[in-house]
Amino acid sequence: CWNDPSASSDRNVTRLCRDEESARIIFEAWRSDESIASAVSDGAVFRTEKVAYGKGSQQHGQLTSMEGGKFDGSNVGPRPGLLLCHTAVGPQDLFLRWKAEALASLGYVVLTVDVLCDPVGYAWDPTWSAAARARVMANGRALLRERMLASFSCLQAVANVDAAHIGAVGFCFGGPCVFELARCNPAALRAIVSLHGILDGEPLAPGVAKMDARVLLCHGDDDPFVPAASIDACLTQLRSVGAEWQLLTFGGVRHSFTNPAQAVNPNPAFGYSAHAAASSWAATTLFLKEVFASL
């Protein structure tokens, strides 16, 4: 799952990880996930489905949900939906497959979002990723908003999703993704979570004056991609629009701290923190439980 799809003649090749060692680390963490293990022991089965959506069906996401277990037939009504927003390496990411299943084990229907139009993991190439991200961030992020709203509509249309109760969780580059959606203020968006997201105070979408979604920010204070001025700009905006927000900051923690594979990333800007990863995930699941109290 770490082969370069652009170097293969097999169009079915999808790259999901940086290298073999990173894949091994993530698989081990996935197998050790207590929430998933508990759901499986209760008889749950996880279902995944690839979906092409958006303008020209160019966005390539994946739906993940749980059947059985606590949803054994007596509790099968519509469930809250969560958009899971990717990092700079795009939607084809083993780490996101794990996190989608972890969220589904809590009862959510999860759509792993694609804002780069990447069906096979091209974004693992830094040059391809940088160009794709530049396109969606250009012109006041209009294309990013368009693709996030398309993702939002796609999830709302899923049969077992409660279309009035949607949340969004973003990692790294997924931070701007969830914020741009919140800045559009769609009525059914109840909550956003940014985990080591790239934060800023970019304007609300045209015609929007407030942000109704509740906000949780989890940040490492040694993240070189998010200087103090960027955090201040983000919080200033949240205050100005009357948002309900929380900020959880971890001292001495670097970028991408939730991903255990960052322990072997030679780039010193990145680093895994077991404490920050566990604490931020506990805060995320509690926050979502509070917002979607029916689960």
Image (cartoon, rainbow, N blue to C red):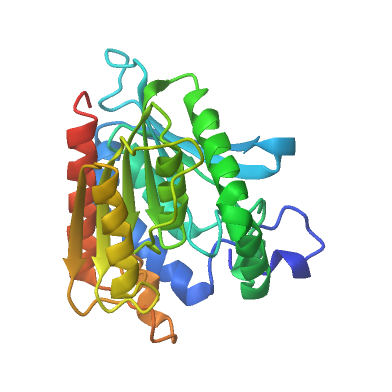
Q: Position of residue 121 (x, y in %)?
A: 63, 60
Residue at point 38%, 75% (across, down): 262
Tell me how many marks there are: 0
What residue is drawn where x is 52% and y is 64%? Answer: 88
Q: Is residue 124 visible?
A: yes
Describe residue 143's horizontal placement relative to residue 180 as left or right: right
Q: Is residue 68 left or right of residue 132?
A: left
Q: Nearer the viewer, residue 140 or 147?
A: 140
The residue positioned 37% from the left and 47% from the top of the image is 169
Quadrant where the C terminus sits is top left
Q: Quadrant of the N terminus?
A: bottom right
Residue lying at 24% horizontally and 41% vertically, measured from the top left: 242
Q: Quadrant of residue 104?
A: top left
How far across and down, in percent of the image, does residue 52 sit? 65, 37
**In the image: residue 102, left or right of residue 177:** left
* Residue 145: quadrant of the picture: top right
Closer to us: 226 or 263: 226
Q: Is residue 32 visible?
A: no
Classify residue 139 by image quadrant. bottom right
Please identify the residue farthest to the top as the structure is shown.
74
Q: Nearer the viewer, residue 200 or 241?
A: 241
Does 111 sit above or below residue 258? above
- In this view, 98 is above or below 70: below
**Image location (x, y in percent) of residue 150:** 58, 35
Q: How far across and down, in percent of the image, does residue 259 sit? A: 36, 66
